Image (spheres, grey):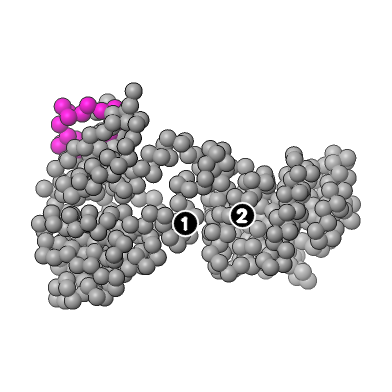
């Protein structure tokens, strides 16, 4: 039997909410809409619902309130005896939210470990290494990799390994120098990168799990021989056939990974992705998205991620999100679309929530002087009771708004209109008074939903209201 859901909203959003729900044409739930008696749905609170929702209108098994609804919904839910949940911050995203619920999207699972390399470790003091390790772990790294540099002494290698272990980190050491790898093994490193078949005597001297590479570039035979030798000795290892950069053999190296997986269906395999993210001048989120699609398809178990170049400063965060999205896609047997928007940093799949006609309809219902701003395919819309203006250039709107004498309001509108112009030009979702979403590229603190956000500086110090109407009636 379909679930019955009651949606609570305000005057201005009721029409759009009805349209969105009708177009969903859902078979697994029926719905009703109740206007709680406020203009702006985003200003709804749990206490307001408690006062204004007649108990007799509740003929539902679940209530969904606007995403910005403030207050203790758990307490209200207990009082009413049914679940009360926040919907998306933008009601036009309801189909996406319900789609995720139906398909059981769970980003807590993945099958890939992230080694995060501190590439300049020899130049950093132990405290700086620890700080970097904490930073990497917060972004999703599972293992801290100390990257050694050719010809650069790493006198405090042992001290760094001990300090990282004491802080609870698993540690790998990446070096081409046999003596450094030997020191790392003696100091208790958990992993060492990288050994080939000519260096297996080092593996016998340490308990660290070695990452194996080919003795010669592209030589899978030598890689497999090294793995067999360690296998006979009862030693675990990780295999790395090495990812080459564009245009120096990327396609062929991907082919080697596929062949290695065919030959070794049960082996742990590592892919170092820095040769693509760091050595390609392109937004790394998209590169990571495709790489992790390949990684998940091939069953790669470990990746070595690098965060050195400024254009890759969120590469570890991206890798963490990508491994979860692609794992979920594979697990559910669906395309990696609509699972999570974290890697869509520059553009949104559905940038314009409302049509120009819907915005015009809302504008006609406005009876106050406060400006609303929205973005549609035809440009930036700004409107209040005195007019509705559309432009593609934020500066073109200034002469039409009559705010020359109101500095704080002008400052506020200038900031909001420029955000709206950026959103329009890039194809991003714009919501007035909210930051633009840049996916994993920009971290945002979680908003406290028990209270509404405090007034901004232009409202606190200005002479006029520079935001949405704060009146409830």
Q: How many marks?
A: 2
Q: Residue, x 15% and y 27% (percent of image)?
A: 56
Q: Is residue 255 above or below residue 148?
A: above
Residue 89 position in % (x across, y down)? 32, 48
Q: What label does residue 221 carry, if any?
A: none
The residue where tag 1 is placed is 344
> Callout 2: helix, strand or loop?
helix
Q: Residue, x 59% and y 50% (percent of image)?
A: 293
Q: Residue, x 16% and y 58% (percent of image)?
A: 363
Query: Within the magenta stretch, is there residue 62?
Result: yes
Apparent side of residue 350 relative to residue 370 in the rendered image (left or right)? right
Q: Is residue 233 above or below residue 281?
A: above
The residue where tag 2 is placed is 291
Apparent side of residue 275 relative to residue 330 in the rendered image (left or right)? right
Q: Nearer the viewer, residue 92 or 35?
A: 92
The span from disc 1 to disc 2 (Cα, nearest Å) is 15 Å
Residue 132 position in % (x across, y down)? 59, 59
Hey, which residue is sitting farthest top in the picture?
1
Q: Can residue 241 be seen from the camera position used here? A: yes
Q: Are the two marked residues, 1 and 2, in contact with CB atoms closer than 8 angstroms?
A: no
Query: Within the magenta stretch, is there residue 442?
Result: no
Apparent side of residue 15 relative to residue 231 in the rendered image (left or right)? left
Residue 120 position in % (x across, y down)? 67, 66
Q: Quadrant of the N terminus?
A: top left
Q: Nearer the viewer, residue 275 or 154?
A: 275
Label 1 packing within 10 angstroms: few (<14), some (14-19), many (20+): some
Magenta-tinted stretch = 49-63
């Amino acid at each position: 039997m379909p679930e019955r859901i009651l949606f609570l909203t305000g005057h201005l959003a009721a029409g759009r909410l009805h349209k969105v729900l009708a177009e969903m044409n859902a078979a697994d739930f029926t719905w009703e809409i109740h206007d709680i008696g406020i203009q702006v749905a985003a200003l709804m609170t749990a206490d307001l619902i408690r006062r204004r929702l007649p108990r007799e209108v509740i003929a539902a098994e679940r209530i969904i309130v606007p995403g910005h609804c403030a207050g203790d919904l758990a307490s209200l839910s207990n009082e009413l005896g049914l679940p009360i949940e926040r919907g998306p911050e933008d009601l036009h995203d309801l189909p996406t939210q319900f789609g995720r619920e139906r398909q059981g999207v769970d980003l807590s699972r993945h099958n890939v470990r992230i080694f995060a390399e501190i590439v300049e470790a020899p130049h950093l003091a132990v405290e700086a290494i620890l700080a970097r390790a904490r930073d990497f772990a917060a972004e999703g790294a599972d293992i801290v990799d100390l990257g050694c540099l050719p010809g650069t002494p790493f006198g405090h290698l042992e001290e760094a390994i001990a300090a990282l272990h004491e802080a609870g980190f698993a540690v790998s050491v990446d070096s081409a120098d046999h003596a450094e790898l030997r020191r790392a093994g003696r100091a208790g490193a958990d992993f060492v990168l990288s050994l080939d078949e000519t260096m297996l005597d080092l593996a016998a001297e340490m308990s660290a799990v070695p990452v194996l590479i080919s003795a010669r570039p592209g030589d899978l035979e030598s890689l497999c021989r090294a793995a067999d030798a360690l296998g006979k000795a009862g030693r675990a290892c990780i295999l790395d056939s090495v990812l080459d950069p564009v245009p120096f053999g990327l396609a062929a190296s991907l082919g080697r990974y596929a062949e290695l997986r065919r030959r070794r269906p049960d082996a742990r395999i590592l892919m170092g992705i820095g040769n693509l993210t760091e050595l390609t001048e392109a937004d790394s989120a998209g590169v990571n998205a495709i790489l992790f699609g390949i990684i998940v398809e091939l069953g790669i178990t470990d990746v070595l991620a690098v965060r050195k170049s400024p254009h890759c400063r969120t590469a570890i965060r991206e890798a963490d999100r990508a491994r979860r999205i692609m794992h979920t896609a594979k697990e559910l047997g669906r395309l990696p679309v609509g699972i999570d928007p974290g890697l869509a940093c520059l553009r949104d799949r559905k940038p314009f929530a409302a049509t120009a006609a819907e915005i015009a309809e809302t504008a006609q219902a406005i009876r106050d002087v406060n400006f609303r701003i929205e973005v549609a395919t035809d440009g930036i819309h700004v409107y209040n009771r005195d007019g509705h203006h559309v432009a593609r250039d934020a500066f073109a709107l200034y002469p039409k708004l009559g705010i020359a004498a109101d500095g704080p309001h002008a400052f506020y509108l200038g900031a909001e209109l420029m955000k709206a112009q950026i959103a329009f030009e890039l194809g991003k979702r714009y919501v007035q008074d909210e930051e633009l979403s840049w996916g994993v590229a920009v971290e945002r603190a979680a908003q406290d939903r028990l209270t509404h956000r405090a007034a901004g500086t232009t409202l606190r110090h200005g002479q006029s209201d520079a935001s949405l109407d704060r009146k409830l009636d």
